[in-house]
Every structure is written in structure tokens, then in C-alpha cells.
Image (cartoon, rainbow, N blue to C red):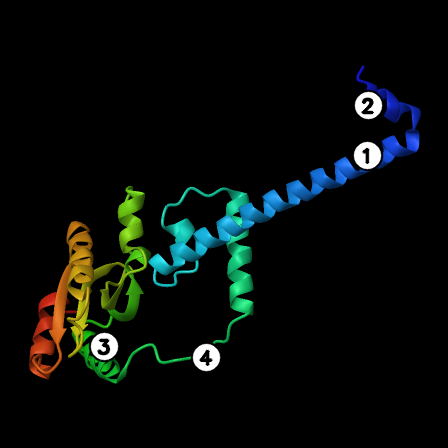
Amino acid sequence: MPVEILALIDKPLLLIAVLAVGAALGIAVERLTEGQKRAERRAYWQGRNRGKRGDPFAAIKGGAKTGPADAGAIATGQLACVMGAEFRARPLLNRPEAKLFKALDAAVIARNPGWQVMAQVSLGEFLASPDKDAYGAVNAKRIDFALMTPDSRVAHAIEYQGSGHHQGTAAARDAVKKEALRKAGIGYHEVVAGHTTAGELRRLVEKLVPGE
């Protein structure tokens, strides 16, 4: 047995002190490691949210492999973020969109009261895919208006192209939505600001929605 250990045995109080210091250091290291892991999970969650346009469950819906502990950490991080922020209500649609919604809704009801118009619907709510990456690519993307059948299925998507729509990466985002909708057998149609008349909108509805 090493001389140092024998010396400690001869001095029990010193031995107890050494063991106590060792235990404290071990606990400190464990807590530091756990804190680093929590920080990494929080950073991961924040990064996923930035890539999912603020979807609060992006890390889970997007197909990331998370266990109960990770999901709990994500929820805890989200709650802390929300508790420290301010919120205010705002309109779901801007004025041109609201005007189009009213005209579209009236035309659909007149054509077939069993159909409904939904606004600002996430593709992830009515599309499904076994490919988690592909689903994650469309999950948080939205369509302006959805024409829903009496059995609650989206049959057509209608996008309102305002004056400032085709800017930045809008064309690329639209291409992603169009392809996903095409593969699901859902129609995609555009209403262009300043070009689509009330009569053209009614004729579009008559084409898409079967009569009562």
C-alpha cells in the first residue's frame, strides 16, 4: 500500500476531509457536464426553430430523433423562452387577403355549402410522408387558402400573389409547396393581385368545387 495512503489512514480526520473534497469535486463535474448538455439541447432547439419559421415543435415534428429527456428539455426551453417574451394579437390576414377570403368563401358556399375555405393552413397538417426529411421540408410551410371537402380533406390550395410576393426566395419556396401538393394529388392555383377579377374568381370556384 502506498505510503501516502498509510499516512492518511493514521490520520482519520484528514482522510475524511480528502474524501469529502473528492466527492464535492465529483458532484461539481457531474453538474457541469449536465449543464453543458442542457445548453447544447437548448441551442439545438433554437437552431431548429430558426429553420422552421418559429414552429415551437419543429425538433419533434421535423423528424429529429429525440427521446423523452430531449423532448422534456425542448419543452422546458420553450416555456422559459415564452415566459420571458411579450405577445400581442394580430390579424390572421392582411387587408387584401381578408378581402379575397370573403369573396372566395362566399363563392364556395354559393357553389356547395358542404365545402369550406380555410386560411393560412400549414402543409404539415394535411400532408403526410414516410420520408421524415421531406416532411420536415414542408411541415411549417403554409398555403394562403385551402378548399376543404365535406369529409375534411383539402382538395385545392389557392395562393394569393400580392404585389411584393415574388421577392427573395419566394419562388423556391413556392416550388417546394407545389411539388408536395402535386404528389399528394392536391391542386395548386394562384390568384394574382390586380389581375384576377371577381368573375374569374367565381369561374375558378365553379371549376374546382362540384355543384351541390
Q: Is residue 136 above or below residue 147?
A: above
Q: CA distance from mark 4 to mark 1?
A: 57 Å
* Residue appearing at x 33%, y 57% in the figure: 125
Residue 33 in the image: state x and y as whole percent. Answer: 59, 43
Which circle, 1 or 2, is nearer the viewer? 2
The residue that label 1 is drawn on is: 18
Seen from the viewer's position, the closer of residues 130 and 210 is 130
Kindly identify the amino acid type of the residue bearing the numbered disc 3: Asp
**Which sits earlier in the primary sequence, circle 4 or circle 2?**
2
Which circle, 4 or 2, is nearer the viewer? 2
**Which sits earlier in the primary sequence, circle 3 or circle 1?**
1
As helix, strand or loop, the secondary structure at mark 4 comes to loop
Describe residue 28's horizontal placement relative to residue 164 as left or right: right
Q: Residues within 10 Å of mark 2 (few under 14, many from 20)?
A: few
The answer to whether residue 84 shows anywhere in this view is yes
Which quadrant holds residue 154?
bottom left
The residue that label 4 is drawn on is: 88
Q: CA distance from mark 4 to mark 2?
A: 67 Å
Quarter of the image where the N terminus is located: top right
Residue 133 in the image: state x and y as whole percent. Answer: 29, 45
The residue that label 3 is drawn on is: 105
Seen from the viewer's position, the closer of residues 5 and 123 is 5
Q: Is residue 13 above or below residue 183?
A: above
The residue that label 2 is drawn on is: 4
